[in-house]
Image (cartoon, rainbow, N blue to C red):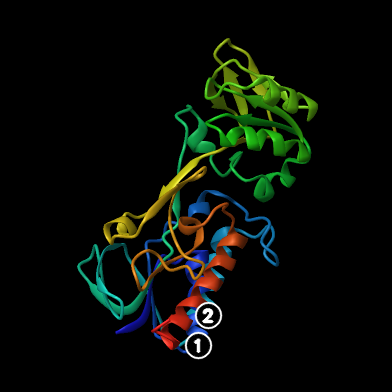
Amino acid sequence: MQDVIIIGGSYAGMAAALQLARARRRVLVIDAGQRRNRFAGHSHGFLGQDGVEPARIWAEARSQLEAYPTLRWVEGNASVISGHKDDFRVSTDSGADHTGRRVLLATGVVDQLADIPGLTERWGKSVFHCPYCHGYELDQGRIGVIASGPMSLHQAQMLPEWGTVTFLTNAALSLESEQRTDLIRRGVTIEEEPVARITGRAEVELRDGRTLPFAGLFIATRTTPASPVAGAAGCTLTETPMGTQIMTSESKETSVPGIFACGDVARAPHSVSLAVGDGAWAGAQLHRSLVWPES
């Protein structure tokens, strides 16, 4: 019987595991090995690790965790959560069953990318979603924002902080006069010809045959939980402007007593720094629930 079973071994899950292991609690991490930022060559904006390869950050963190004798790491995909508080059972696709008093969902999310030829191959390399993570490296060059929904306007308004912006509305939204005026005031060029494809590093081919070169592109994705286990276990999901996430209390507990959630799957906006902070808080709250189970 584990004290806590953590489903998801990326940044949030590992940050929670560290708090619990340091409290000498028995922790099992089940990790499917699908970090959201695996497509990016470098991670930015994370204090002390700025510019470091994401895989290196993850590997060093896992190595540090495995030095704690009460922590165990299993590679696999958690498929079913059953049972109740103080007696949960987590089953994996391999057929293994693990029992624990608490469960923490740190599965992360997947990005639903727009259906634009050439976008998927460049995701995380020259097409991004977070200016704080990737804007500085574009060296104040030309930036294209491809509209995919209402959140795209927010991106177009912010990104002039990082370069010269062209907002490609791509028939995804219609700008009201006040919005158009605001963008022009910020120095944003508005391009309404639909996007045909992305080529080169970050060149946008329009349907009328023109090609617009950029230092980098941004697009707002909608996210969904990377695993269906939360919904199947009865955890309430909620819709945000950025996508679907697990609803939690301030203590990071879901609607199911004894099941907690943290990281991108349980908060917005998203970044490595925010995921680590959220995971550390969730780990501390999980420990408190074991010390004071009646609260």
Quadrant of the snapshot with the N terminus? bottom left
- The residue wearing badge 2 is 19
Left/right placement of residue 22 relative to residue 8 reads: right
Q: Amino acid at mark 1?
A: Ala
Q: Amino acid at mark 2?
A: Gln
Q: Can residue 102 be seen in this snapshot?
A: yes
In percent of width and height, residue 173 lies at 55, 24
Residue drawn 55% across the image and 62% down it: 275
Residue drawn 65% across the image and 19% down it: 191
Quadrant of the snapshot with the C terminus? bottom left
Q: Quadrant of residue 95?
A: bottom left
Question: Circle 2: is it few (<14), some (14-19), or many (20+) Cα within 10 Å?
Answer: many
Q: Can residue 62 be seen in this snapshot?
A: no
Question: Circle 1: is it few (<14), some (14-19), or many (20+) Cα within 10 Å?
Answer: few
Foreground of the two, 264 or 289? 289
- The residue wearing badge 1 is 23
Furthest residue in direction top, as rendered: 208
210 is higher (above) or lower (below) than 151: above
Q: Quadrant of residue 213?
A: top right
Q: Secondary structure at mark 2?
A: helix
Foreground of the two, 4 or 237? 237
Residue drawn 55% across the image and 22% down it: 170
In percent of width and height, residue 257 lies at 35, 71
In percent of width and height, residue 114 lies at 47, 32
Foreground of the two, 39 or 251? 251
Do the numbered discs 2 and 1 sit on residues whose CB atoms are within 8 Å? yes
259 is higher (above) or lower (below) than 119: below
145 is higher (above) or lower (below) than 251: above
In percent of width and height, residue 206 lies at 58, 17
3D distance between C-alphas at marks 2 and 1? 6 Å
Left/right placement of residue 104 relative to residue 242 reads: left
Q: Secondary structure at mark 1?
A: loop
